[in-house]
Image (tube, helix red, strand yellow):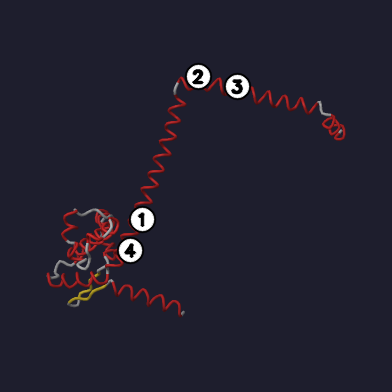
Amino acid sequence: MIQSKSSEKKITNHLQQDVVKISGKTIFINPFLYWRRFDENTNRWLREPGQMSEDQILSNRNRFYPEIEWADLSHEEKLIKDATVEMFLKTLELIGTFHPNLSSGQLLEIERKMAIIKKIPFEKWVKKSFAKKARLLENEKRKFLRERFLSSWREWFSLENTQQAILPLIVTLFISAFIGWSLGISKNSCNPYFEQNINQLN
């Protein structure tokens, strides 16, 4: 019972961080809380980084990360921060779409609160998204290489020259195996111990 109340409290606190109250209106600043109102295209647009132009991202870097010296960041860090900037822009666009009556001042207030509250969660989500995409690409690469390997072998086996070369080899291997088996039986039959065992069985 105590654990249940503790879990509920954590969930409530987490949801409170995703909500901003403005003029009596409840505004979700977590874009995924709007998912019930998404169509498939909007869902894909939100979840896949790289849906906004580079110019949009670059011009808004200092808007959400005024404290950062971008030249000092590594390439990987820039990718994560840029994708996070994209998440901020997408979220503000969704909020403006689902709450069209908000004034520019109210949107600015929401933006400021988002920059404080959602920066770390957005960065974590972006890192997970990149890791998932990397895994999918690696799986696709392995699948492609496996299919290409099998396809090349099938093509090689289907060639007439290959079949003409392999058929005698298969026949030779079969004959060799048969001769080896025959010699093994013949050798055992000449072995006194082998005959003694047969007599004992009889």
The numbered mark, 3 or 4, whose residue comes first in the sequence reads: 4
Residue 124 badge: 4
Q: Residue at x 33, y 55 (%)?
A: 130
Q: How much space separates mark 1 and mark 4, taking CA atoms? A: 11 Å
> Could you tell me how many numbered marks the image carries?
4
Rendering coords of residue 196 (x, y %): 86, 32
Mark 3 residue type: Thr
| Earlier sequence position, callout 2 versus callout 3 | 2
Q: Which mark is on residue 164?
A: 2
The vertical placement of 2 against 44, above or below, is below
Secondary element at image label 2: helix
Give residue 48's position: percent from left, percent from top: 28, 55
Q: Residues within 10 Å of mark 3 (few under 14, many from 20)?
A: few
* CB contact under 8 Å: marks 3 and 4: no
The mark found on residue 131 in the picture is 1
Mark 1, Cα crowd under 10 Å, few <14 / some 14-19 / many 20+, is few
Residue 119 location, quadrant: bottom left
> Type of residue at label 1?
Ala
User: Going 12% across and 69% down the picture, which residue do you hit?
Assistant: 104
Q: Residues under labels 1 and 2: Cα distance?
A: 49 Å
Tell which circle, 3 or 1, labels the residue nearer the N-terminal end. 1
> What residue is shown with label 3?
172
